[in-house]
Amino acid sequence: CAGMTQKELYQQALNKEYPNQALVTMDRKHLFFVLAIMFILAAVIGCEEEDSPTSPAPPGLPEELYPIQSSVSWIYDVEAYKNDSLLYRNTDTLTIDKQVIWGSSNWYGLSDEDSIYWRNGVEGVWRLLKDSGYSDGFAEKYYAYPVAAGDKWYVRSDDDSVNVVSIIETVDVPAGVFHGCYYYRFERSNRSRLASVWIKPGVGIVQQSELVFASGDTLESTSKLRKY
């Protein structure tokens, strides 16, 4: 914690409360006790474990950015292009169909992902990697929530910078029109990948797009929510 040292705080209190130095010896034990309680309270308030429940959302917002629990599913219309030529157009169903316990918490996996798990945690949605590169598991915050437009953070495992573009987006997809969507933008440090994700709090991802530059090719994909 930044600021004055315990010794400085103690001396300041002495100078203010006890200008007569003859009284210092008599009340020194009492003053040390009060200062100790103040420091303990400051440490407790300023520290929080990453595996504690999600921080309360402001009034009117769902407590969780999107539902992460067994058997929840979303259906998306998906299109993919390579150098502006259509590769495929399909309807994909994503279902939470896996569960592991890591760090004394339940983590949930999607049907289209191996060795990747998710949970609602402190200040947003966290991602757990348990592949060959992270055999013991590695977790970090992926989607911050609640957030404000302009908030930024870094996803180290992907080397992505994340920026909250807006929290009042209106998105029109086959599943309907969603107001108040959060718009997250991901950018790889070498600019080989750009991704945009629109999430409606309490519903999940309603739309996302990805642009990847690899071996001279441009790969582009979009997903739009059809049903949930």
Image: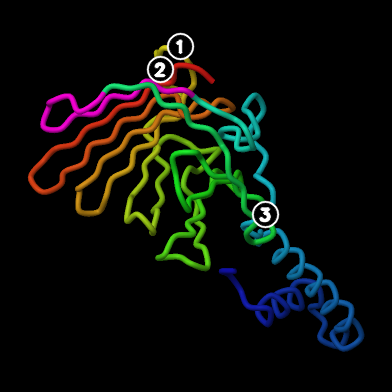
User: Which residue position holds label 1?
Assistant: 177
Q: Position of residue 52 (x, y in %)?
A: 69, 53
Helix, strand or loop at label 3? It is: strand
Q: Quadrant of the N terminus?
A: bottom right
For badge 3, the amino acid type reads Ser
Q: Position of residue 217 (x, y in %)?
A: 11, 41
Label pair 1/2, CB-CB below 8 angstroms = yes
Q: Earlier in the sequence, mark 1 or mark 3?
A: 3
Q: Residue at left 54%, top 20%?
A: 228
Q: Is 137 on the left-hand or right-hand side of 225? A: right
Magenta stretch bounds: 75-88
**Residues at marks 1 and 2, CA–CA distance in whole angstroms:** 6 Å
Mark seen at residue 105? 3
Among the 4 quarters of the image, the one containing residue 7 = bottom right
Q: Earlier in the sequence, mark 3 or mark 2?
A: 3
**Residues at marks 1 and 3, CA–CA distance in whole angstroms:** 34 Å
